Image (cartoon, rainbow, N blue to C red):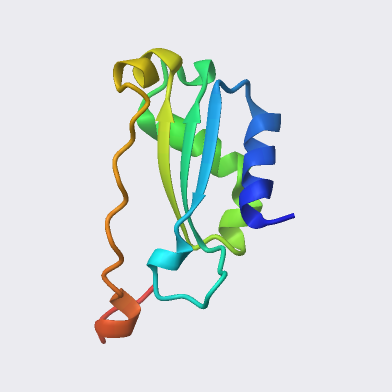
Amino acid sequence: MSVAQAIERKIRDAMPVVQVTVENESHRHNVPANSETHFKLTVVSESFAGKMPVRRHQAIYAVLSEELAGPVHALALHLFTPEEWNARNGEVAASPDCRGGSKHDPEFTR
């Protein structure tokens, strides 16, 4: 099972969801071909109702703790209630291009 598939399965098992989208954005970064290290995760769930963004993020971090401790280097989270999702017409912001920090910036540290 790929990392993206594992992320989706864990989210679906952890909470009732209207929509889950996992996008592997690794190809946009300075990593080897076919890497699974950088992801954009969009989750629409009623379980986010009444929760501030930080609480929503913490819920996702708890579910994906193994992935975040292992293969996943970056995870962009877009977390919405169904009402918020509908108000946005199902659109999320585009991820910024990689600036190649570790490759081009000698001051870069993880």
In the rendered view, would you say 69 is above or below 30?
above
**Left/right of residue 109 with respect to residue 15 in the rendered view:** left
State the residue lying farthest toward the right.
Answer: 1
Residue at 58% in and 23% down: 17
In the rendered view, would you say 106 is above or below 108?
below
Where residue 39 appears, x then y in whole percent?
Answer: 48, 53
**Which of the 4 image quarters holds residue 13?**
top right
**Which of the 4 image quarters holds residue 67?**
bottom right
Residue at 44% in and 58% down: 25
**Left/right of residue 96 with respect to residue 77 in the rendered view:** left
Residue at 36% in and 16% down: 86
Where residue 91 appears, x then y in whole percent?
Answer: 33, 31
Where residue 84 appears, x then y in whole percent?
Answer: 35, 18
Residue at 57% in and 70% down: 34
Classify the position of the C terminus by image quarter: bottom left
44 or 52: nearer the viewer: 44
9 or 49: nearer the viewer: 9
Classify the position of the N terminus by image quarter: bottom right
**Left/right of residue 20 with respect to residue 89 in the rendered view:** right
Labels in figure, total: 0
104 or 48: nearer the viewer: 104
In the rendered view, would you say 59 is above or below 35?
above
In the rendered view, would you say 105 is above or below 21?
below
58 or 99: nearer the viewer: 99
State the residue lying farthest toward the bottom.
Answer: 106
